[in-house]
Amino acid sequence: MSTLIKSSRRDFLKIAGTSVGGLVIGFNWFSCDSPKVEVLSTEEILAQAKSFNSYLSISPSGDVVIYSPNPELGQNIKTSFPMVVAEELDADWGKVRVVQANLDTEKYERQLTGGSGAMPHSWERLRKAGATAKFVLVAAAAKTWNVPAGEITVDKGVISHNASGKSGHFGEFVAEAATITAPEEVALKDKKDFKIIGTPVKNVDAMEMYTGKPLYGLDFYREGMKHAMVQRAPFGMKIKSVDESAAKAVAGITDVVTFGTSVAVVGTSTWPLMKAKKLLKVEYEADGNVESTSDHDRIFADLMANGKAETKRADGNVNQAFKNAAKVVVAEYQCPFLAHSPMEPENFFAHVQGDKCELIGPTQTPDRARQSAADILGIPKENITVQITRLGGGFGRRLRADYAEEAVHISKAIAGPVKVTWSREDELTGGAYRPAVRYRFEAALDADNRMVGYKLKGVGMNAGNSTRENNFPSGAVDHVLIESVNYESSVTTNAWRAPITNFLAYAEQSFLDEVALEAGKDPVEFRLELLNRAKSNPVGELGYDVDRMIAVTKEVAEKSKWGQDPNVKQGLSVYFSHRSYVAQVADIEMQGGTPVLKKITAVTDCGMVVNPIGANHQVRGGIVDGMGHAMYTNLTFENGVPKQKNYDSYRLIRLKEVPEIETHFLDSGFDPTGLGEPALPPTGGAIANAIFAATGRRLRSQPFIEQKEFSDINLEIRRA
Amino acid sequence: MANYNLKINGKAHTVDVADDTPLLWVLRDHLGLVGTKFSCGIAQCGACTVHVNGTATFSCVLPVSSVGKAEIVTIEGLSEEGDHPVQKAWAEVDVAQCGYCQAGQIMTAAAFLNENPSPSMEEIDNAMNRNICRCGTYHKVREAVALAANTK
C-alpha cells in the first residue's frame, strides 16, 4: 500500500542503528522467505509525518511512529508502551515504528524507570493518545466522505465506511485530520475488543541487538571525543595526595583530572586508561566511618538489641499476646550487601560548552541526570539535553546519576566532549549497593495453634523504613508490632530491584514456614487460614488485596500439585509488592538421597497482561535473579573497600544453575500493573522452604552456599 | 605502539596500537565494531565473545599481538543480513531482555553449533554456561540454540 518506497531493508537497519533507533516490530525471519519488502526509514517517515500528540506521528504513507518516553533496560517497555497506543489507534502493528524519546518533561510525565510503575502510571495516558488520534482520523474520513462518523469502522490502520464501500489507510487522512481539534474526552475500547494488547509481540529492538548495532551508551562514539575512567575513594575516605606522573606517562593519556574524592584519567581510547588507572598513586585518609563487614555484623547485633526503634505499626496488645502464648517462635534473618551489576557497566557522554550541556547515555532517571548537571555547572536545566540510550540492564543502579556527574565534571575540566566508562571492578567497588539488613521475627501461637501475635523488627542500613508494615500478615493477626531501626552507613547504598522486599519477602516467607511447622499446619492451609481471617475480620489497615492474595495462593497450590507426590518436597512463598501478586512453589525431588531442585511454579496476578512474551520474561527473569542472589552472591567489605571485585569472586547465576520455571497468569480483571520487580521477592523463600522440606535445614542467611547449614547439602539443579 | 594487520569479518584492517591492547578494544575503539561488548574484562562473562579461526574466544583478554593471521569474526560479520540460523532463532524465540549480553551468547552458540550441529540439551547447557546473562534469559537462550540446531 505504501507508495513511497526508497531504501532497502539493509539500509534501513543501518540508518536505524546509528540514529533514532526505530525498527519494524514483530518481524519474523522464519516467515521471510518471500522477496524482501522495501520500506521507508524512520527518518523518512518522520520527515513527512504529522504529529498527533507527544506519543504519535503518522505519515501520508500510513506509517505510524510511536515515541516511547521511558528508559528501556530490559523490562520491555519500549515494546509494551507502543502496543497500548497502537491498540486504541487500531493501527496495523506491521506499520508501527518505535522511537526512544529524549528527555522532555514538557511532553511526558514520569519519564523514568523504577518501582515497576511505568505501566500503571501511563496506561490511561497511552490509551488516550491512541484513541484521540483515531478520533480525529475518523472525523477526517467522515468529513471527506460526507458520512456520519458513527458509521465508520477502523481496523489495522484502515478506515472504512461499509454502506458506501469507501475505505482508505490512515495516511490518506493525515492532512485533513490536522484541521480537526482533538476532543478532551474520548471513548476507550472495551478490553474484550483488544487485538494487540494481550498478544505476543516481539522486542522492537531485536534485530539491532542480534546484529551488533550501536544501541547502548557504551557504544556511543563521536568524532573528537575523549575517553575517561575514574578512580574513586574507599567509602568513608577522602584524598590525601595524588601522584599522577606514572599514569600521565602512558601513551594515549592526555589529562588527569581530580574532583571531589575522585581522580580521572583521560585519553584517546579505553585500554590506555585501564593501564594508567593502575599507575595512579592516590593516598587516602579517613573522612568518616571506614567500615568492614565485621563492623556491620556487630552493628546489627547491637542495634537489634539496643537500637532506638521507630514503631511502624502497632495493633492490639502484643505484650499480652506473647505473655499468654502457648508457643512462641523466634528467628533472625540477615542478608549481605549486593551490587546491581548490570552487564553494561556504567558510562555516560557529556559535552559541556559554555552554559550548555549535552548528555547521552544509559539512565533510569534522565531528569535526575539533567538536574545534577545543572547543579554542577550552575546553569538552567533548560540548557541541558539528555538523550536516553538503550540500557544494558539497570536493576536500580542507573537511578543514580553519579556516573553522569563524573562525565560533566571531566568535560568541564577538559573543555571538550568525553565518555566516562566504568570497568567491572569500578562497578563492584564504586557502588550504590543493596544494603545489608537484619530482621527479627517473633510469633505467638495460642492453644489452638492460631497465630495471635506477630512482631517484626528490622535493622537497615541507609534503608529508612526497612519494613513493609501493612503487608501480609498484618491485617490477619490481632496483635502486631512492626519496628524499624536505621543505621547511617558510609557505604553508598541505593534501591536495588524490589527495594526492601527483595530480602524481606524471603525472610518473612521463611519465617511463616517456621511458624506453620510449629503450629503443625500445612504451609498452604496456614496462609489461607490467615488470609481468610484478614478477609472476614481484618485488623487495621491492609496494604494488599486479600482476595487476589488468596487467589494466587490457591492457584499455585493447584498448578504445582501441592503435596501430591511424597517424593517431591515443596516450598511455598506468596508475596505482594509493587502492586502485583506472585505465588511460587519450588520443587525438590529426592533422587537416591540427593535433593534435586527441578522446578519453580509461579502464579502471577499483575492485572491484564499487556504482552505475554514480556510478562513471561519478567517473571522468569525475576525468579532467576532472586534465586541467583539468594544462592550464590555475596559482597563483603574490608576497610571501606569491597573484597569481591569482579565475576571471579562475585558469583552470578549461570545457565546450568536454573531449574525449569513454569509461569501462569491470573486474569483478575484489573488494569495492568508493573512486572519488573514483583516476581523476584518470593523466590528465595520458596527455595529455602523447599530445602527445609527436603533436608530439615533452615537457611536464615544469604547467600545459601556460604551458610554452614548448607555446607553438606549436595543440592543439584536439573531441569526435566 | 606497532602496526597490526588484522583480518576481521573477511576484510583487512591495519591498526596502530600498543601490543598488549586486547582485541576487544581494538574492535570497539579503533575499528568502530561495537557489537562486541565489554562487561567483565577478565574472561568470566562472555559478553566479548568473537570467533578466532572459528573458535569462540574471549576478546577482552586476547592481546592484539597474539592474533597474528587468524581470521576474526565478530557479531557484525556473522552474516550479511542478520540471517545466520542462530540470529534467526534468537529473533524467533525473542530471547533478549536488556540484550547487552546477547551478541556474545549468539557468537558462542554459532561456534558451538558449527562444531556440534546436532547437540543434546545437556551439550547445549555445557556450551552456553560460559556466558552470563544478568537478566536471566537462560531458558530462552537454551530454547534458541535448540531451535537453531533443528532449523539449520
Image: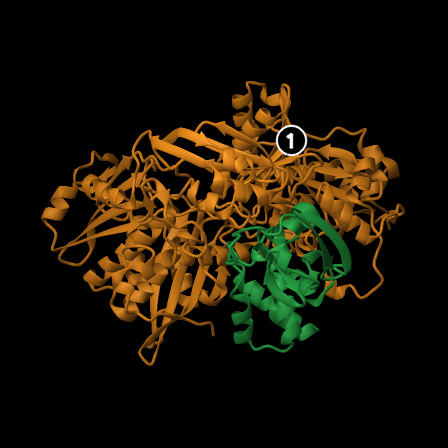
Question: What is the secondary structure assignment of the residue under circle 1?
Answer: loop
> Furthest-bottom residue in view?
A592
Looking at the image, which residue is at 39% across and 38% down?
Answer: A493
Determine if residue A393 is in view.
yes
Judging from the image, mark 1 belongs to the subunit labelled: A
The answer to whether one can see residue A529 in this image is no
Tell me: A636 left or right of A268: left
In the picture, measured across the screen, residue A101 lies left or right of residue A559, that is right
- Out of A158 and A441, give the one closest to the viewer: A441
Q: In this rendering, is residue A384 above or below A555?
A: above
Name the image quarter holding residue A595.
Answer: bottom left
In the image, taking residue A67 as reference, residue A665 lies left or right, namely left
Residue A12: x and y in percent read: 79, 49
Looking at the image, residue B71 lies above or below residue A386: below
Q: Where is residue B79 in the image (x, y as percent from the top left)?
A: 74, 62
> Viewer-proximal residue, A660 or A576?
A660
Q: How many marks?
A: 1
Find residue A415 and report its horizontal and vertical position in percent: 62, 25
Q: Mark 1 points at which residue?
A: A417
The quadrant in which residue A386 appears is top right
Three-letter amino acid code at disc 1? Pro
Neighbour class for label 1 at 10 Å: few (<14), some, many (≥20)?
many
Q: Which chain gets the orange colouring?
A: A
The residue positioned 32% from the left and 36% from the top of the image is A489
- The picture places residue B16, in percent across and down from the top left corner, at 69, 47
Front-most of residues A609 and A107: A107
In the image as oriented, which residue stretches furthest toward the right?
A: A3
Image color mode: by chain
The colour of chain B is green
